[in-house]
Image (tube, grey):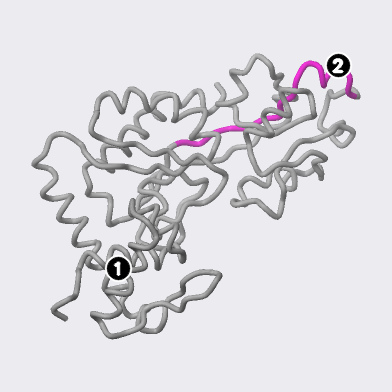
């Protein structure tokens, strides 16, 4: 064990969580040959094989499964030390990765990050705004914005806000489409929606949850694409008020008859909640949302 390198455990965790050397290397800021060498060195020091290697990726062996909780415990201790000792440094340094739904991330959070970055010039903020659910246990993000609270895991969650959605389209579509005066008229219209088998969250399955069955003719896994289609007059689309309500290119259709409500939750892994940079970033997001609650509720 004289050759055992504790830093190699960081590499072990990255490969265990991603299953691929190249992805793990990107997270660690190095190259895949270095990652491979570190894993081989760790296996040599422990005299045990930790991964099954296959063209499809790396999976843990029985020895790797036994090492995983030990490595995670050491990671937790390291993060706890950073959280405790880091308080002595008044400036925030390092990187914080925020995972958020594309609408919230691109249209609400991104325009507000400049002021936060200016206040903390040594902090790197990474915003991943995509349609998907982020795994905090695999360290895909330090802070995640989800549409529902977590059901398991060592995660800390708080509700950011409720938000409302409605039906939107362009004036050009309404001018050429059949009359639309009540809910019963909806089946005669063309809809834009999500691709059902690519949905990451059941909360996004808007069209099949209403009392009037609707099947979208134009579908996308991406909210930004749906927004663009609605602006261009492709059809009716369910959109959040905080995005569409201030867009002069869109018309709010049947506002008194069609309304949905969802919620945003801020989620942090319990191991990270004590880190100053994570805590400060989370507080910033909470403050920004609280100051714009009327925007989310469509008031």
Q: Secondary structure at mark 1?
A: helix
- Residue 26 or residue 246, whichever sits in front: 26
Q: Quadrant of residue 179?
A: top right
Q: From the viewer's side, name the closer residue of 114 and 200.
A: 114
Residue at 66%, 44% (x, y): give it.
221
Q: Which residue is mark 1?
A: 38
Left or right of residue 36, residue 179 in this image: right
Percent across and percent down for residue 138 are 40, 60
Residue 43 locus on image (x, y percent)? 30, 79
Residue at coordinates 31% horizontally, 36% vertically from top-left? 124
279 in relation to 259, above or below: below
Q: Secondary structure at mark 2?
A: helix
The Cα–Cα distance between marks 2 and 1, rounded to whole angstroms, is: 64 Å
Instruction: Assess disc 2: are there few (<14), some (14-19) or many (≥20) residues with their C-alpha within 10 Å of its C-alpha.
Output: few
Is 75 part of what is drawn in magenta?
no
| Residue 8 on image: x %, y % | 26, 67
Question: Where does the image place residue 162, in percent across and percent down from the top left?
Answer: 50, 36
Stretch in magenta: 161-177
215 to the left or right of 14 = right
Pick the quarter of the image with the C terminus. Answer: top right
In this rendering, the answer to whether 228 lies above or below 126 is above
**Which picture quadrant has residue 174?**
top right
Residue that numbered label 2 is attached to: 175
Identity of the residue furthest to the left in this view? 88
């Amino acid at each position: 064990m004289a050759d055992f390198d504790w830093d190699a455990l960081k590499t072990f965790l990255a490969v265990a969580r991603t299953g691929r050397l190249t992805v793990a290397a990107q997270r660690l800021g190095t190259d895949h040959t270095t990652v491979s060498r570190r894993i081989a060195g760790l296996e040599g020091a422990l005299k045990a094989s930790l991964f099954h290697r296959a063209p499809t990726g790396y999976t843990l062996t029985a020895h790797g499964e036994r090492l995983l909780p030990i490595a995670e415990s050491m990671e937790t201790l390291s993060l706890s030390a950073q959280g405790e000792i880091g308080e002595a440094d008044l400036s925030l340094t390092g990187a914080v990765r925020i995972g958020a739904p594309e609408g919230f991330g691109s249209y609400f959070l991104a325009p507000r990050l400049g002021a936060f970055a200016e206040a903390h010039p040594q902090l790197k903020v990474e915003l991943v705004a995509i349609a998907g659910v982020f795994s905090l246990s695999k360290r895909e993000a330090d802070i995640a914005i989800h549409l529902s609270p977590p059901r398991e895991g060592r995660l800390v969650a708080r509700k950011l806000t409720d938000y409302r959605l409605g039906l939107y389209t362009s004036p050009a579509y309404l001018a050429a489409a059949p009359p639309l005066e009540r809910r019963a008229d909806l089946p005669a219209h063309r809809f834009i929606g999500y691709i059902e088998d690519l949905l990451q969250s059941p909360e996004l399955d808007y069209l099949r949850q209403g009392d009037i069955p609707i099947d979208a003719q134009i579908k996308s896994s991406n909210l930004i694409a749906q927004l663009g289609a609605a602006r261009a007059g492709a059809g009716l689309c369910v959109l959040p008020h905080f995005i569409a309500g201030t867009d002069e290119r869109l018309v709010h259709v049947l506002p008194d008859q069609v309304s949905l409500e969802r919620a945003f939750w801020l989620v942090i892994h319990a191991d990270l909640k004590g880190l100053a940079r994570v805590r400060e970033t989370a507080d910033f997001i909470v403050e920004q949302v609280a100051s714009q609650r009327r925007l989310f509720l469509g008031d």
